[in-house]
Structure formats: structure tokens, C-alpha cells
Image (cartoon, grey):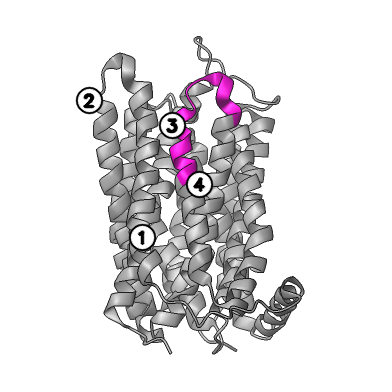
Amino acid sequence: MIQKNNPRLVKAWISYDWANSVHSLVIASAIFPVYFTAMTRNTDGSPIRFLGFLPETAFNYSLAIAFLVVIVLSPMLSSIADLIGNKRKFLRFFCYLGALSCMGMFFFHSADLIWLGLLLNVTASIGFWGSLVFYNAYLPEIVSEEKMDSVSAKGYMFGYIGSVVLLSICLAIIQFAPDDQVGFFTRFTFLLTGVWWIGFGQIALTRLPNKKLNREIPKGIFKNSFRGLSNTFKELNQFKNIRIFLAGFFFYSLAMQTIFLMAAMFGSSEIGMEETELIMTILLIQIEAVLGAWLFSFLSGKIGNKLTLLIGVFIFIITCLIAYYIQPSDPNVKTQFYMMAGMVGLVMGGIQALSRSTYAKLLPETEDTTTFFSFYDVFEKLALFFGLMIYGSLIEYSGGMKASALAMGFSFAISFCILLFYKMDKK
């Protein structure tokens, strides 16, 4: 029997956010996208197409493939983990897959290796998002319901702080690198990210509990895992508010995560921001996200989860409208971009932390937390898959990213309307 609110276990759980969040910042949103954009340009600034696609579109589609793989794998793997009790082993596998993929990005050093950069981006993303299926499922096992909001927020806060620390180190390495060695030292930051992830990940991988391992793997485990998923879906479907929450969560995740992943490319393509300015902007978003995670946890305790989520979604709608109407010729365009970044940073961390704890509160009493959380993760990855496909397709169709920003605003609006009907109970 796991003792809930055990400080040692809580700290171990939070430590994994510190470890893996560096991928989310350095690889997924800040340095690697900027590096990829630079590597896929000719000397005259024209884009180098990959398999006939614009580089931004190819980047979007590569991430969409990663999320599709996670969508297919995670429900089955999480159900198996619940059946045989080795959740930590799966967490370790995906952690190592993601971290080693980050290290491999060091070898993406020319336009001839675009395929390698995209492939490693896919496997690193699978490692990151796949590990979160098992990581998130620990929350209701080790923390009581009244502490879920605060512990979930602490996880995101330490994750943001850790990623900011490493990004600052990486930025200093790039800034002080000799002019003819900037590419090498940029690729070195990818290697450093993988080492950070594996190194600090050991705290969680050695301390988080396993259920008593069923060493005799049941016959027909794959069949049983899918049967378990089917039963879990039927059980969740009985709760109206879980259905409503997951629907609203789907639409705001579709837009929110896509915006964060594409922020650097938007600034580069639409605004003409310099690489250093873009990285500093992403750094600003992360620092504000620490405050946002705390603020939303505080607000949820005062005004409830529902109203706090609605406020966050509404702010995102305004941000998307600003992005659509922003004009590169405006002398204040960079100020407007920084303002958008500030709005995103303030609400993103809060919404992420509150979403995780809200879903955990809505779950019925069960020991199969991994299977239940796999549905949460499937909805999030499915949303990201569609978000990236929509974003990438609109880029290819319109030749720019503004239409995509407007589409994300529409998705937030749908989510806002759905969440109006959601109530904070399990019925």
C-alpha cells in the first residue's frame, strides 16, 4: 500500500518534471526549431523543401507523426503496465528514448541531414510524451485529492525552473561561442539536454514505487489490455462531466500546445525576429509560466477550477486574434510579439497544471490510474496531432502562419463554449 503525501515520493515525482521539461523548452520550442529553420535555408534565404514540403510544414508533420505513434502505443502500454505493475520500467524506457534522441541531434550538422533531424525530433517527442503517460498516472496514487492542485502545480513550476536554468546555460554557450563555431556549440546544447534529462531522471526512476510485480505475465495480455481499455472507456462514459471536460480539454489542448511548439517559427517567419530574440522570448514564456502555475493554483482555490480554466482559455483567444492582425511593417511589431508571449506564458503553465489535477479529481476510485490517465494523454496527443496537421496544412496552403493562428483561436472558442457546461463533480 502506497502512503499518500509521502514527502519523499512527492519530491521524487516532482523531480521528473525538472528532468524532462528541458526537452519541451530546448528541443521542442526554443533552440532546435530555430536551428532547424536556419539549417533549411539557402544562402539567399529561400527555404529548402523536404519531400516537396516547406520546412515549417515538414517540421509540423514530423511532430504529428510522433503524436500519432504515442496515441497508438500509450493506451496499450499503460493498460499492460497496470496489469503487471511495472509502470516505472515503461517510464524509464521512454525517458531513455527521448534523452538519447536529443543527444543524437548533435549529428544534424548539414542540410543533407534534414531527414536525420526530423527523425530524431520524432523519436525525442515519442520519448517525452510517452513517458508522461506513466508519470502523470502516479499523481492520484501518491497524492490525496485535496493536494493534487498544489502538487501538480509544483511539478510544472519546478519543470519550468529547471528548463529555464538549462536554457540560460545553453544560451550563454551559444552567445559566447566563436562566430565560426556557433553551429557546433548549438548542437552541443542538444547533447547537454539529453544528459540533463537522463541524469536528473534517475531520482524518479529509482524512488517512484512499483506495484507488486506480477512476474508471471498473464496469457493473452495484449487482448486483456485492450479489453481493459474498452472497460475503462465505458466506465468514463458514464460520467457526464468527465465527457464534457475531456471535450473542452481536447480543443484547448489542440490550440495551446500547437501555439507553444510553433511560437519560435512564427516569430522567425512572420515577424523577422533574430535567433537570440526568439530564444529570449521563449525564456520569458517559461519564467512567466512558473508564476502562472502558482497563480492558477491559487485562483482555483478561490474561485474554482472551472472559472479559472475559462479565464485562461479566454486570454488565449485574445492572443490568437492579436497574432492574426499583427503586421510585420508596424514599428511596434516586436513589442506586440513580446506582449503575446507574455500572455501565453502567464496562462499556459497554469492551464497545464490545472488540467492534470482537475482530471485526477474527476476520476472514480480505482487502482488502474495508468489506464485512466492514458485516455487523458490520448485526448491530449490526438489534439496535438490534429492541431499540427491543421497548422501545417494552412501554412502550406496560405504560405504563412497567420491563418493557422486564427484557426487556433477558433479552437479555443469552441473549448470555451464546451467548458461552460462542465461542473466540478464526477456525475
Of the residues tagged 2 and 4, which is closer to the observer? 2
Q: Are marks 4 and 1 in contact (CB under 8 Å)?
A: no
Amino acid under disc 2: Phe
Helix, strand or loop under label 4: helix
Amino acid under disc 1: Gln
Which residues are drawn in magenta?
100-115
Q: Which residue is mark 3?
A: 106
Q: Which residue is mark 1?
A: 202
Of the residues tagged 3 and 2, which is closer to the observer? 3
| Mark 4 vs mark 1, CA separation in Å | 31 Å
Helix, strand or loop under label 1: helix
- Compared to residue 177, the image places residue 65 above or below, namely below
Q: Which residue is mark 4?
A: 259
| Mark 3 vs mark 2, CA separation in Å | 19 Å
**Label disc, if present, on residue 176 of the rendered structure:** 2
Residue 136 in sight? yes
**Residue 89 appears at what percent x and percent y?**
51, 66
- Residue 273 placement: quadrant: top left
Of the residues tagged 4 and 3, which is closer to the observer? 3
- Compared to residue 245, the image places residue 65 above or below, namely above
Mark closer to the chain start, 3 or 2? 3
Amino acid under disc 3: Phe
Judge whether residue 108 is colored magenta. yes
**Residue 80 appears at what percent x and percent y?**
63, 72
